[in-house]
Image (cartoon, coloured by chain):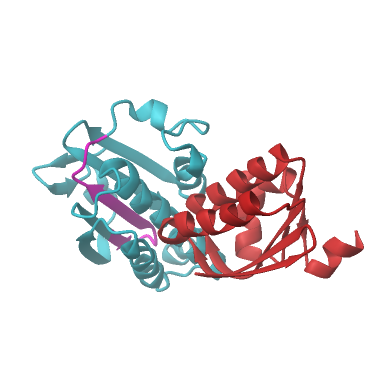
Chain colours: A red, B cyan
Amino acid sequence: MNADFKQVRDTLVVRISGELDMLVADQLRQEIDRRLDNTSISTLILNLEKVSFIDSSGLGVIIGRYKKVSAQQGRMYIVGACPPVEKILHFSGINKLVPLYRSEKDVVSN
Amino acid sequence: MWSVIKGRWTSPGLELRMNVKNYVRFEFSSMPENVSFARSCVGAFAAQLDCTLEDIEEIKLVVSEAVSNSIIHGYNGSTDGKIEVMASIFDNGSLEIIVKDFGRGIENVEQAMEPTYSSDSSRMGLGFTFMRSFMDEMDVISEPGQGTSVRMLRFFPSQNHQAMA
């Protein structure tokens, strides 16, 4: 797993690649939280274009960040999930809390 | 439905129903690094069945959940535990997966399998829900202090159909 962070004003984009399971869940959680805690972020975008696998450990990271961002009156979006990952996001009901978009551009234009 | 007797997996009636066509069995230490190894292994094994890539993804997911449960709940994150995985393909085209640990066990299996229950809130308690949803049969045998075994079975209808034709 690799996570690339890009911040533009109060929007944090996290581009994740690899497999999101229990091996990497803690590291990803800490890396995102460090930025949420230290800077003023109102919008968190998780780009999952290059994520090939996700299980409940990965879903746990997403739902935890959603709670954190919501508590700070921020918004969160997921973009670019491939069909297998998108299916799991739908199955878990996360898509009802965190809107799914095809690309980062789609979030901006909406 | 089935039981663990002296470390040997047996399933009363299973042998009468179908024969094992092929199987793999492996064990590994309870390290998070091995979760991806286990799911890839079983996914590759399942690929010889007449199934779709989507089926393989579901198989990998349920293995990931069962092995993660063993590490997180069975061994409380300790990396010196042992996990055994056995996957069998039966001649009717069904796939059986058994994930077994020798950890602390589950006090109340029924409670642990409830969709909303999780003793680790960060994982949402979805593990058992995935296993139950993506597999046709699922049983959990657990004894506090002895460990936990999860057995899952998935039928692949097209093969059943071919077998009957």
Q: Which residues are magenta?
A: B87-105
Image quadrant containing the C terminus of chain A: bottom right
Extreme-front residue of the structure: A38
Q: Quadrant of residue B75?
A: top left
The magenta stretch spans residue B91: yes
Is residue A17 toward the left or the right of residue B101 in the image? Answer: right
Extreme-right residue of the structure: A109
- Residue B79 versus residue B125 in the image, above or below: below
Question: In the depicted view, which residue is nearer to us: A57 or A53?
Answer: A57
Q: Residue at x 51, y 54 (%)?
A: A30
The magenta stretch spans residue A88: no
What percent of the width, then of the height, locates residue A107? 83, 61
What percent of the width, then of the height, locates residue B26? 21, 64
Is residue A107 toward the left or the right of residue A82 in the image? Answer: right
- Residue B83 versus residue A50 in the image, above or below: above
The answer to whether any part of residue A66 appears in the image is yes
Is residue A15 toward the left or the right of residue A98 in the image? Answer: left
- Residue B116 versus residue A11 in the image, above or below: above
Is residue A1 toward the left or the right of residue B102 in the image? Answer: right
Q: Residue at x 36, y 61 (%)?
A: B35
What percent of the width, then of the height, locates residue A35? 62, 57
What percent of the width, then of the height, locates residue B63? 39, 56
Extreme-left residue of the structure: B6
The answer to whether any part of residue B90 appears in the image is no
Question: In the depicted view, which residue is nearer to us: A99 or A90?
Answer: A99
Question: In the depicted view, which residue is nearer to us: B101 or A9?
Answer: A9
Label count reads 0
